[in-house]
Image (tube, rainbow, N blue to C red):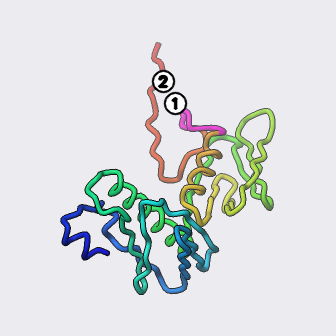
Amino acid sequence: MAAVIQDRKIRVSRVGKQPVPVPVGVNVTINGQQVTLKGKNGSAEIQIHPWVLVQQEGSKLQVTPKVLTNEAKYRAMTGTMRALLNNLVIGVSQGFERKLQLVGVGYRAQAQGNLLNLALGFSHPIEFKVPEGITIQTAAPTEIIVRGVDKQQVGEVAAQIRAYRPPEPYKGKGVRYADETIILKEAKKK
């Protein structure tokens, strides 16, 4: 398919041109537009857009547009599907994680089964129900580690936990990402 694209001078997304490497230990099943991946961290599946074709060539997945045209929407969808497929391959083989820190006096977290108990300075404790496919660990009372196969879901869960008490701009107290930089404002002067 790639040779036909080059002969006709059809452009493809720069991301979409690159094949998706499949590491050893990851099984790929392509059933029409449904791609299922199984690895050591679990399994995931993705529904490929009808404009895009996925083929397995040895230990690589090649993503190409079904329609041979220079329209931007087909190139963009090819790149998008390739990026989503690559994220799933990384997820089932290595997994994704996001670290959160609690900054503030008395702020703490404790993971208990599928619940995350948070004490964030409110008059009541917060119980966060952990969704299916996500694991949460608390290495220390002020550190939360969110892990999972789906990159989007890991980021969404971390954002939901951070939204309970985002860092405030004067002292920096609240829930923040471990790699986040908070720019503090100067206090009002008299």
Q: Nearer the viewer, residue 154 or 102?
A: 154
Residue 34 position in % (x across, y down): 56, 69
Q: Nearer the viewer, residue 171 or 1?
A: 1
Q: Secondary structure at mark 2?
A: loop
Q: Work out how far the residue at label 1 is from the one at label 2, CA to CA, in angstroms.
A: 7 Å
- Judged left or right of residue 108, residue 69 is left
Q: Quadrant of residue 163?
A: top right
Q: Main secondary structure of the magenta part?
A: loop
Q: Compared to 46, does 25 lie above or below?
A: below
- Judged left or right of residue 15, residue 45 is right
Instruction: Identify the residue at image location x=40%, y=56%.
Output: 77
Instruction: Identify the residue at image location x=55%, y=63%.
Output: 47
**Residue 168 among those drawn in magenta:** yes
Q: Nearer the viewer, residue 24 or 147?
A: 24
User: Is the residue marked by circle 1 packed among few (<14), some (14-19), or many (20+) residues within 10 Å?
Assistant: few
The residue labelled by disc 1 is 170
User: At label 1, which amino acid type do we have?
Assistant: Tyr
The residue labelled by disc 2 is 187
Q: Compared to 20, does 51 lie above or below?
A: above
The part of the chain drawn in magenta is: 164-173
Contact between marks 1 and 2 (CB within 8 A): the answer is yes
As drawn, the label of residue 157 is none
- Judged left or right of residue 6, residue 180 is right
